[in-house]
Amino acid sequence: MAAITIKTEEDIRGMRVAGRLAAEVLDYIAPFVKPGVTTGELDRLCHDYMVNVQGTVPAPLNYCPPGYTPYPKSICTSVNDVICHGIPGDKALKNGDVLNIDVTVIKDGYHGDTSRMFLVGQPSILARRLADITYECMWIGISKVKPGAHLGDIGHAIQQHAEKAGYSVVREFCGHGIGKIFHEEPQVLHYGRPGTLEKLVPGMIFTIEPMINAGRREIREMTDGWTIKTKDRSLSAQWEHTILVTETGYEVLTVSPGMPAPPAFIASQDTQAVTA
C-alpha cells in the first residue's frame, strides 16, 4: 500500500485555495439548477467558470484511471438513482429530481474536491429526507476527525446514522486522500468499526463523501463505464467535503460563502468546524 502523504504548511495553503475554489463553483452553478436545464448545460457553465473565471483546471475532464476510458466531462452530475460519476448529457432536469454535482478543480497543482445535493423544483418528502440525513452523515463523520482517532471511527459513525434512518451505505466507493494527486491514500470507508484502520495524524488531508441509498446498498454499473446506479433503482444521495486533520481536530477546506451551514448539532459542538 502506498504511504499516506503528510502535507506541509505550503501544501495546506495550496489546498485551502483549491478547496475554496471548488466550493465556489458549486455556489456559482446553484441558481442554474432548475427544471428544464440539461446536465450538459450545467457542465458547460461550470467548465467555463473554472477555466475562464477562476483559472483552474477541471480535474475530471479526461481523467483516466487504469481500466477506465477517459471521463468526458468537467463535472459529475448524478440524478435520482445515480449514486456517483453520472456523465452530463442532453437529459433535462425535471421537477422533483435530486441531483448531486461533484466538482474537483486543480489550482497551482493542488486538487480541491467537493459535492452537494441540489433539489430540483419541489422534491418529495422522501428525497428531501434522504438528502438531509446524508448531509448529517457527512458532518457526523467529519466531527470524528482529530489526531489519534481512527478512520474506522468515521465510517462507523456514518453507518450508524444512515442505518438508524433506514438507509444503506454504498461500500464500493469511498473517500480518499487528496493533494497534488486526485486520489491517494488513505481510503476513507463510510462504514466500519471504531478503533480500526489508520490512525489520524495532523497534516493528513482526505475527503469524506458518503453515498447513502434510500433502498438497498447494491450497485450496478452502466455501459458507459462510469455511471453507477442503485441496483434496486432507489434514490441515492451524496455530499462531500475535503478535510484537514489539525493539531486539535479538523478544518474543512472546501468552504465558500454559499455553502450550506453545518447542522446545528455540529455548530454547537465545534466553532472551528468551518474556517475559511
Image: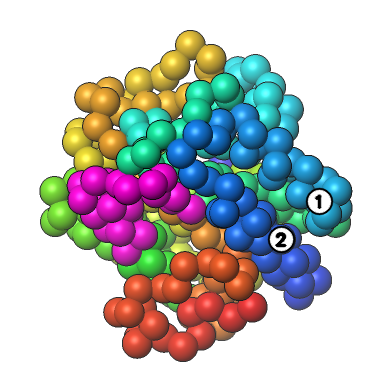
Query: Which stretch appears magenta?
Result: 116-137
**Which image quarter holds the N terminus?**
top right
Instruction: Count neighbours of disc 2 (C-alpha within 10 A) and say few if under 14, some if 14 to 19, many if 20 or more.
Output: many
Q: Is residue 185 left or right of residue 108?
A: left
Q: Is residue 269 magenta?
A: no
**How are the residues colored?**
rainbow
Whether residue 153 is visible to the viewer of this picture, yes or no, is no
The residue under label 1 is which amino acid type?
A: Thr
Amino acid type of the residue tagged 2 in the rendering: Leu
**Which numbered disc flags the more N-terminal residue, 2 or 1?**
2
Residue 106 is marked as none
Q: CA gap, disc 2 to disc 1?
A: 8 Å
Which quadrant, please, contains the C terminus?
A: bottom right
- Mark 2 highlights which residue? 21
Residue at the image position 65 percent from the left and 26 percent from the top: 71
Residue sitting at 70 percent across and 69 percent down? Answer: 16
> What residue is shown at x 22% (from left), y 59% (from top)?
161
- Check disc 1: other Cα within 10 Å, few if <14, some if 14-19, many if 20+: many
> Do the CB atoms of the residues marked 2 and 1 lie less than 8 Å apart?
yes
The picture places residue 181, in percent across and down from the top left corner, at 71, 47
Relative to 175, say whether 69 is above or below: above
Left-right relation of 188 to 154? right
Judged from this view, the residue extending furthest toward the front is: 36
Name the mark on residue 56: 1
Please say whether residue 125 is one of the residues in the magenta stretch: yes
